[in-house]
Amino acid sequence: MTPERLDVEHALPRMQALASQLWSPQSRHHPGQLAWSAAYGEPHVLDLGPAFLLDTAWAWLESRDWLEVCGTDAAAVEAVVAAALAVADDEVTASTLETEDVTVAALTRAGFVEVDAPWFTHHHLDLADLPPVVLPEGYAVRAVRPGEAEQRAAVHRAAWSPTSRVTTAAYERLMTVAPYRTETDHVVVSESGEWVASCCVWLDPATGVALVEPVGCVEEHGGRGLAAAASVSALTAARDLGATEGLVCPRGDDDHPGPARLYRRIGFVPGARTRTYRWRRDG
Ligand SMILES: CC(C)(COP(=O)(O)OP(=O)(O)OC[C@H]1O[C@@H](n2cnc3c(N)ncnc32)[C@H](O)[C@@H]1OP(=O)(O)O)[C@@H](O)C(=O)NCCC(=O)NCCS
């Protein structure tokens, strides 16, 4: 059982297909999260590592010291993890959902040990229960249009960080990566035309799961429900396109509790959390 080694650019459609096929509320990977992780910055900036694939599992060195794993066949998962570790840095961190027993067992057998680290809680929402969009006066919410990558990247950076790797060129490329679609990428615009909040939703048509990633609101317009409005609006568009379930994965630890509160206000319910493992060569 020798896994195939591929650049993530070429591996991504197969990685996404397996994640979609194995999807359940107990699994970590969604095709949209993989698209975002592989394309939120320009390739030379992200410095992504290779992926190792079998028909029933893959392991991806998102960077030489960060491993993502997908699969439910124990032997296949062990084989892809071993192939990735053979070319990884001497210290590698991996994050799984606590419910992914096969991945946790494979990591443990490979020598990974659990470590304390910031963690994330997957949240789920039956989209039949989505509330209406509520916007304060003076704002409008709408889908991004083709050709608006520059403004879209700028509103993301303004909310997250001026040094964010989400550049215009990166966003232009992201917009070509499946399952991205402008119809489910929403922005809040102020009366003066300033873009102030955003939410990108990724619909996996095979499972009907719509992932919220990422959400942002610029600080000067914060605390008015704009991030919530962008999220509900983009999720409503996803539901109109066939989505049945929403998914979002905010921080679960106490250091950054605001986003989880925001999603729970919308109606998202917490599910499984992530756990972090670390491996040292010969360690
Ligand atoms: C987290 C973030 C998206 C929140 O954006 P926001 O537009 O301020 O969010 P909201 O206005 O919907 O909610 C923020 C607070 O305002 C309050 N609020 C919302 N509407 C309100 C209203 N009409 N009147 C009074 N308060 C209101 C909410 O109750 C909430 O308070 P809480 O955090 O104590 O629960 C934004 O701060 C951000 O972009 N941060 C950096 C990026 C980030 O962390 N993104 C999320 C990662 S998953």
Image: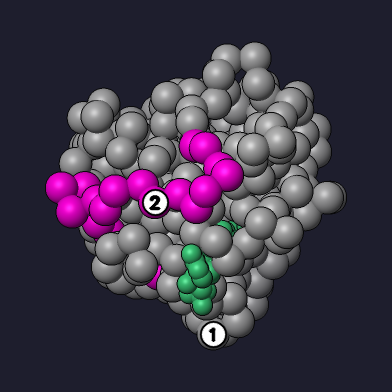
Circle 1 packing at 10 Å, graded few (<14), some (14-19), many (20+), is few
Residue wearing tag 1: 254
Q: Position of residue 3 (x, y in %)?
A: 45, 37
What residue is at 64 percent from the left and 77 percent from the top?
Answer: 283
- The scheme the figure's colours follow is one colour
Residue farthest front in this picture: 137
Secondary structure, mark 1, is: loop
- Is residue 47 in view? no
- Ligand 1 location (quadrant): bottom right
- Depth check: give the residue in front, 63 or 144: 144
- Depth check: give the residue in front, 161 or 249: 161
Q: Amino acid at mark 2?
A: Val
Please provide the residue range marked out in magenta. 120-141
- Depth check: give the residue in front, 80 or 94: 94
What residue is at 65 percent from the left and 71 percent from the top?
Answer: 280
54 lies left or right of 120 = left
Name above or below for residue 106 compared with residue 188: below
Name above or below for residue 140 compared with residue 249: above
Residue wearing tag 2: 134
191 lies left or right of 272 = right
Distance from label 2 to label 1 (Cα)? Answer: 28 Å
Pointers 2 and 1 in contact (C-beta within 8 Å): no
Of mark 2 and mark 1, the one earlier in the sequence is: 2
Query: How many marks overall?
Result: 2
Q: Amino acid at mark 1?
A: Asp
The reply to whether the residue tagged 2 has its Cβ within 8 angstroms of ligand 1 is yes
What residue is at 54 percent from the left and 26 percent from the top?
Answer: 144
Q: Position of residue 274 (x, y in %)?
A: 43, 70
